[in-house]
Image (cartoon, rainbow, N blue to C red):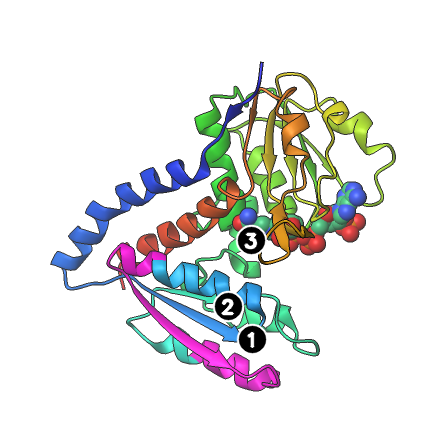
Amino acid sequence: MPATLLDGKKLAEDVRSGLGPRIAVLAARGIVPGLAVLLVGENPASVSYVTAKEKACAELGMRSFERRLPADAVEADIIEAVREFNADPAVHGILVQLPLPKGVSESRVIEAISPAKDVDGFTPVNIGRMVIGDPCFLPCTPHGIIKLIEVAGVATAGAHAVIVGRSNIVGKPLANLLTRKSINATVTVCHTGTRDLAEHTRRADILVACAGVPELIKAGMVKPGACVIDVGVNRVDDPSKAKGWRLVGDVDFAAVSEVAGSITPVPGGVGPMTITMLLYNTVESAERPA
Ligand code: NAP
């Protein structure tokens, strides 16, 4: 039986609908949640991500502030732009679109973001708070994945979750969230040093693919009935398309759908949830006492 499709677009709409009344309450207090976006250079994927985030803000009646710097901007100028956003009371959340140009330290730029406005949840302060379970902004992609797993109806307590990828923005924070007592999964994290990847993935009740490798996960690597979350966004050549390419995830969707119990599509799975959790964190930031 084909897997149940985990519709990230629909879930994102539901979460955004829940934000509407909270934004109205803030408006009555004269507060409009504001997201500041800093974009360095003209990377087409980054430009389209930023445009999508600004559009999503506008649709919810939130404000967005955009600052663009040229690709040859020096680190000091980027950090200065971050500090200006830190000081602006109309800004409740700051997003620095990654990647930054070569030669610029992403760590130093991220560390310049005020933790109180770090709605991406990337600063060391927020990550530290997340790890010890203190109130913090949860990183958007892992937070969105947790919500998708929840709606899949998967019993997480005691489940074996296997994450393929250990980046700071997806794999590592997700491993931490899945081992929280409230979720109680047992987690295996795989990476390029993992021996026999399939041996691990086949034991997963929850399999999260976040490697950035097109269709890495084949049907034979998936336990029947597993919940499969595909984080990957990869462009592959496709001469049949007018633009010459199409997007695929890290999972061989057609084949794995025949084995998994539930699965996210690409596009329309994790991506819409990532943007939505960014808006969620920005509203939460605006609600905090000044
Ligand atoms: P990343 O920083 O490149 O990390 C990739 C991770 O996967 C690394 O830990 C790497 O291992 C591991 N890996 C790579 N190839 C592997 C293989 N063959 N077997 C096992 N592990 C392997 O990537 P990222 O930023 O986490 O992003 C991952 C993917 O998710 C990308 O396609 C990205 O576009 C997508 N993404 C989507 C969203 C969304 O909202 N939909 C958000 C973020 C990212 P090593 O550590 O050993 O190198």
Q: Tag 1: residue type? A: Glu
Query: Cα distance, mark 2 to mark 1?
Result: 6 Å
Secondary structure beneath dot 3 equals: helix
- The N terminus appears in which quarter of the rendering? top right
Task: Work out whether residue 130 or residue 220 is closer to the camera in this orientation and state it.
Answer: 220
Which x, y percent locates residue 170? Answer: 61, 48
In space, the residues marked 3 and 2 are separated at their CA atoms by: 26 Å
Tell me which corner region of the image, top left, top right, bottom left or bottom right, holds residue 248.
top right
Circle 3 is placed at which residue position? 127
Q: Is residue 263 magenta?
A: no
Foreground mark, 3 or 1?
Answer: 1
Residue at 50% x, 27% y is 5
Q: Is residue 157 left or right of residue 59?
A: right
| Number of numbered discs | 3
Q: Residue at x 42, y 54 (%)?
A: 278
Helix, strand or loop at label 1? It is loop
- First to last magenta residue range: 56-83
Q: Give the residue type that dot 3 points to.
A: Ile
Q: Quadrant of residue 86?
A: bottom left
Out of 110 and 221, give the one closest to the viewer.
221
- Image disc number at residue 47: 2
**Vertical comparison of 105 with 200: above or below:** below
- Mark 2 or 1, nearer chain start: 1
| Cα–Cα span, label 3 and label 1 | 29 Å
Q: Which residue is mark 1?
A: 42
Observer-nearest of 139 and 58:
58
Do tag 3 and tag 1 residues touch (Cβ < 8 Å)? no
